Image: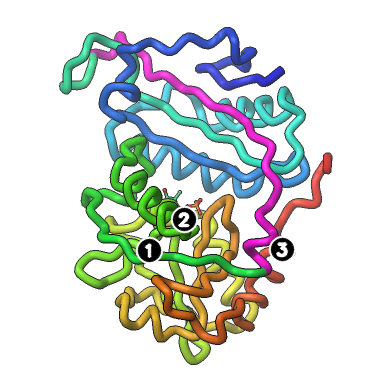
Amino acid sequence: MAYSLWNDRIVADEEIVVNKEDRGYQFGDGIYEVVKVYNGELFTAEEHVDRFYASAEKIRLTIPYTKDKLHQLLHELVEANNLGTGHIYFQITRGATPRNHIFPGLDVPPVLSGSAKENPRPVANFESGVKATFVDDIRWLRCDIKSLNLLGAVLAKQEAHEKGCYEAILHRDGTITEGSSSNIYGIKDGVLYTHPANNLILNGITRAVILKCAAEIGLPVKEEAFTTTEALEMDELIVSSTTSEVTPIIEVDGTVIGSGQPGEWTRKLQVQFDTKIPTGIRS
Ligand SMILES: *Cc1c(COP(=O)(O)O)cnc(C)c1O
C-alpha cells in the first residue's frame, strides 16, 4: 500500500480526495520540490526545504508549518513507504475556493501534498550519456520559482521526447538558460560554464553540489551564460537535476559533443558526486 503526505498527516492514498476548486488544479497556483532518497535517506533535504519556503515567499504563499514540522513529515513519508532509493515529490497550493484569480482570504488554508516513488539511479545514462535538442525558452521571467505552472517545460520536454532526446536545452535568442527540468553546463579548455543563478533559471540544488564538487576536484567555474553555437563546440556538456545527477550529453541535434563519449571532467565530477551520496539505512 502506498502512503501520501496530505497536509499535516501521512495517509493511505485511497483516503485522499482532491477538491476540483483547488487553485493548483485551476491555476497552477503553487510550488513544489523533488528530493532524492538514497538507501532510505533524504539527500540535501535542508536545501530543498529552504528553497520550498523561498519559492512560497516569492508567490506570497504562507506555509502553515514550521520547517522542522515539514522535515518530520517528509521523513514520515519515506518511512511509511519503506522507500529505499527513489524520490519524494511534494507541493503546496494556495488552497481550494470558488475560482477567482484574486488570492483567497486567510480562512482558506493552503493544501500540502506529497508522494514517494521507488526509482533506481539512471546509471546507464551516467555511463553512456544522453542526447539533447535545442528548444526556444518560451517560459515566463520568474524561472527562479519552482512553480507548478509547467506548460513551457512540458511542451519543451515533449518536443525533446518526440525527437528521441532525453532533455530540451532551452535558449533565449541563442543564449542557453537551462534544461526543461534541469541545469546545463559546458566544459571548455578545463573551465566549467553555467548560466548564472538569476531569474532566468531555477537554481538547482544539484547545481550547487556540482559547483562544490568542481571546486574540490580543481575544475574552475565561471557562472557565465553560453550560446547554442558555443555549446556545440564545448569539450563536454552536462545536464543535472535531483534525479539526473551528473548526466553527460554526448549529442545535440545530431552534432557530436567532444569525442562523443562522456568526458574526463564529467567522469571526475560523477566520482566526486558519488562521495556525497548517503550510504543509507536501507538498500
Ligand atoms: C527542479 C529544476 C531544476 C533542477 O533542480 P534540482 O534542485 O537540482 O533538482 C532545474 N531546472 C528546472 C526548471 C527545475 O524545475
Amino acid type assigned to the residue bearing label 3 in the image = Asp
Spot occupied by residue 162 in the image (x, y as percentages of width and height): 41, 53
Is 159 rendered above or below residue 109?
below
Mark 3 element type: helix
Residue 106: in magenta span: yes
On residue 274, which mark appears? 3
- The yes-or-no answer for disc 2 within 8 Å of ligand 1 is yes
Q: Write the start and end of the magenta stretch as one range.
A: 105-127
Is 33 rendered above or below residue 198?
above
Do labels 2 and 3 touch, CB within 8 Å? no
Q: CA distance from mark 2 to mark 3?
A: 17 Å
The residue lying toward the viewer, choosing from 270 and 215, is: 270
For the C terminus, give its image quadrant.
top right
Residue at point 53% right, 41% down? 34
Residue 226: in magenta span: no
Q: CA distance from mark 1 to mark 2?
A: 15 Å
- Per the image, the residue denoted by label 2 is 204
Amino acid type assigned to the residue bearing label 2 in the image = Gly
Q: Nearer the viewer, mark 1 or mark 3?
A: 1
- Per the image, the residue denoted by label 1 is 169
The residue lying toward the viewer, choosing from 43 and 250, is: 250
Q: Nearer the viewer, mark 1 or mark 2?
A: 1
Spot occupied by residue 82 in the image (x, y as percentages of width and height): 76, 29
Residue at point 51% right, 85% down? 258
Mark 1 element type: strand
Do labels 1 and 3 touch, CB within 8 Å? no
Is 251 rendered above or below residue 3?
below
Residue farthest right in this picture: 282
Mark 2 element type: loop
